Image (cartoon, rainbow, N blue to C red):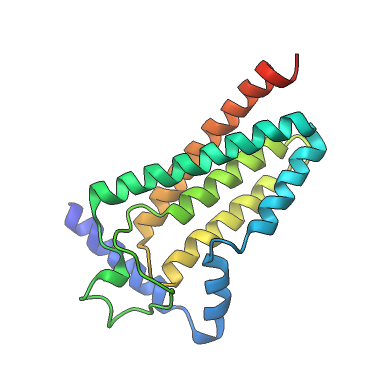
Amino acid sequence: MIEKLLQSDTELFLFLNSSGSETWDNLWLIITHKLTFIPLYALLLFLLYKKYGLKSLLVFVVVVALMITFTDQITNVFKRGFQRPRPCGEADLIDQMRFIAVRCGKYGFFSGHSSNSMAAAVFAGLMLKPYYKNLIFVLLFWSLVVAYSRIYVGVHYPIDIVSGLTFGAISGFLFYKLSHYLLKRFVTK
């Protein structure tokens, strides 16, 4: 059963990865780069400051730092625990795929980019939903695009992506709840 699932995952990866073209490669490399979305994160922090104030912003900065650290470290625990090689690290696949990433990395289950971007999307989307009701959909779409970029550049299988997105959504929601608790406890009295 697991072998069949992993085989289907590999086939889906090869299909999605091979649908890319050199015309779009640079765009996807920009999308997948970790520093590309710093302006987006800065904008989200500005919107949180604008709607909640400075004291709340300090809470948000601490919570977001904890959330990203949490998702990153749990991702690493899973990668070391499962030790599933990335597709770009599979000798049998390298001739069948498009590998355009800067580096490959060792293990891929599950995607840190996917979990971090989804956690940020869910957290910020829920915090700002009372003020910008459709922003969460834009952020979720952005997270899906970031996640897909990992398949496009050849460093993650679809299962890595879906698992990362799921973990990120759960983490984003839990840290959203933590923020609400901290705001009630320390900011709004």
Number of numbered discs on residues = 0
Left or right: 167, with 23 as reference point: left
The structure residue drawn at horizontal position 77% and vertical position 39%, both measured from the top left corner, is 49
Name the outermost residue toward the top. Answer: 189
- Res 124 quadrant in image: top right
Left or right: 118, with 57 as reference point: left
Give the percent coordinates (x, y) of residue 25: 52, 80
Give the percent coordinates (x, y) of residue 31: 57, 67
Give the percent coordinates (x, y) of residue 97: 34, 78
Left or right: 151, with 121 as reference point: left
In the rendered view of the protein, which quadrant contains the C terminus? top right
Give the percent coordinates (x, y) of residue 118: 53, 48
The structure residue drawn at horizontal position 63% and vertical position 22%, both measured from the top left corner, is 182
The structure residue drawn at horizontal position 75% and vertical position 18%, both measured from the top left corner, is 188
In-front residue for pair 180/65: 65
In-front residue for pair 153/64: 64
- Res 186 quadrant in image: top right
Left or right: 130, with 33 as reference point: right
As drawn, 6 above or below 69:
below
As drawn, 175 above or below 72:
above
The structure residue drawn at horizontal position 60% and vertical position 56%, both measured from the top left corner, is 141
